[in-house]
Amino acid sequence: MTTNIAQHTQAEKKHRAIKRLAEIFRDHWEEGRVGSTRIFEHVIPDEWLICARSSSGGRYREHIVPCVLIRNQSIKMYQDGKLVEDVAKMIERHLAIVLVSEEEKNRMDKQRGWKTTMPDGWVFGSGDPFARLIAAGIEFS
């Protein structure tokens, strides 16, 4: 029996896309490839990931955790014997977008040097995924 994907909710489609991304990372790991972080935007539309906007009303798409870190953590998890479902849960927790201003983006990327990193001491699993924005003093809701 086939289902009409158009009948799925956006949340269901997002969940399916996150699982697909986890499977792609597993395939890349098995093949000894790393793959581009551009894969995120090809698999999961931004509008499914936007969760907040800064109080400045910005329009720049800022991933709460840099995609490169999520990709690398996925590969590490497969190296540690984790399953697709485990990786998908990690991705779901850490993959979101907050719309920020250009000034706020520059504060994080250039002034703090967090374009592809998180604040010192932050770790997957126990760290707040919004830590970069909070530490940079960006207010959002």
Image (tube, rainbow, N blue to C red):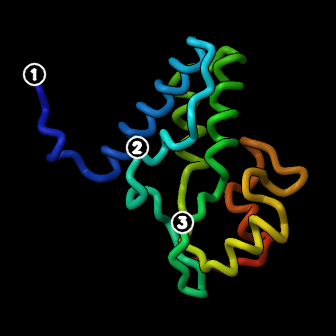
Badge 3 local density, few (<14 within 10 Å), some, or many (20+)? Answer: some
SS at circle 1: loop
Looking at the image, tell me whether mark 3 or mark 1 is earlier in sequence order: 1
SS at circle 2: helix
Identity of the amino acid at label 3?
Answer: Arg
Vertical relation: 74 (above or below) 10: above
Please give the residue where the numbered disc 1 appears in the rendered image: 1
Across and down, in percent, residue 139 comes to 67, 80
> Do the residues bearing badges 2 and 1 touch, measured as CB atoms within 8 Å?
no
Residue drawn at 84 percent across, 57 percent down: 119
Across and down, in percent, residue 19 comes to 44, 32
Give the image quarter of residue 78: top right
Badge 1 local density, few (<14 within 10 Å), some, or many (20+)? Answer: few
Vertical relation: 26 (above or below) 53: above
Looking at the image, tell me whether mark 3 or mark 2 is earlier in sequence order: 2
Vertical relation: 18 (above or below) 9: above
Please give the residue where the numbered disc 2 appears in the rendered image: 42
Of 30 and 106, which appears nearest the observer?
106
Identity of the amino acid at label 2?
Answer: His
